[in-house]
Image (spheres, rainbow, N blue to C red):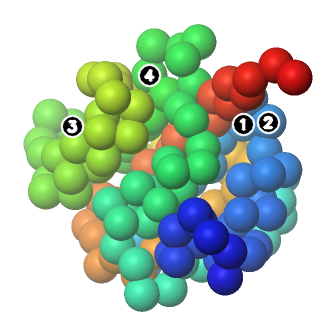
Amino acid sequence: MLKGIDRHLSAELVHVLMLMGHGDTMVICDVNHPAATIAAKTTHGRLVDMVGCDIPTGLAAILTLMPLDTFVDAPVARMQVVGNPGAQVPVFGLVQAVVDAAEGRAITVEALERFAFYEAAGRAFAIVRTSDPGPYGCFIVKKGVVELPRL
C-alpha cells in the first residue's frame, strides 16, 4: 500500500496508468464483455482485472489519478443498447455522475454501436475488467494531460 492511492488500484493498474500518454484510451468493463479476447489486441496486450469492484467504484478510483482529455468533445464513450440505441440502463447514469464529479464539470459521453465499440476497444491502450455484473457496462475513457507545477 501507498499513501493517497485508492485501495481499489492494483500495482499493475497504476503501472498501466503511468505508461499511458495523453490521448491514449482505456476500456473499463463488466464481466460480460469479451475483455480477454479484446485485451490481446491492445497496446498493453493483456487483461487487467479489478476484482470485487463495480464500474462506478473502479472508474472513480482510476479518475483519482487520470484526468480525462479536454481536447476532445467526448472523452468517454459507452456501448449502445443493442436494438434500442436510445435506451438507458442504470450504469449509464452512475458513470455519468462519476465522470462529472471527477472532472468538476459536465462530461459528454458518446454512445457507440456494439461492433463499433469493440473495434474502438481493440485500439485501446488497455482493458480493465471489473466484477460488475452489467449489462452494458462497457466504457472507453481517454486520458488527458496531467497539469504539473513548474519547478
Along the polypeptide, which appears first: circle 1 or circle 4? 1
Q: Distance between the residues labelled 3 and 2?
A: 31 Å
How far from the left and from the top, in percent, is residue 133? Answer: 30, 78
| Residue carrying label 2 | 21
Q: Distance between the residues labelled 1 and 3?
A: 26 Å
Along the polypeptide, which appears first: circle 4 or circle 2? 2
Contact flag, marks 1 and 3 (Cβ < 8 Å): no
Q: Which amino acid does label 4 sit on?
A: Ala
Contact flag, marks 2 and 1 (Cβ < 8 Å): yes
Q: Distance between the residues labelled 4 and 2?
A: 17 Å
> Closer to the camera, 142 or 81?
142
Q: How far apart are marks 1 and 4 (CA)?
A: 14 Å
Contact flag, marks 4 and 2 (Cβ < 8 Å): no
Identity of the residue drawn at 40% across and 78% down: 53
Of tags 2 and 1, which is closer to the observer?
Answer: 2
Identity of the residue drawn at 38% across and 40% down: 102
Along the polypeptide, which appears first: circle 1 or circle 3? 1
Q: What element carries label 4?
A: loop
| Residue carrying label 3 | 85
Exactly how many numbered labels are in the figure?
4
How far from the left and from the top, in percent, is residue 60? Answer: 41, 56
| Residue carrying label 1 | 24
Q: Is mark 2 on a helix, strand or loop?
A: loop
Q: Can residue 139 be seen in this view?
A: yes
Q: Which amino acid does label 3 sit on?
A: Pro
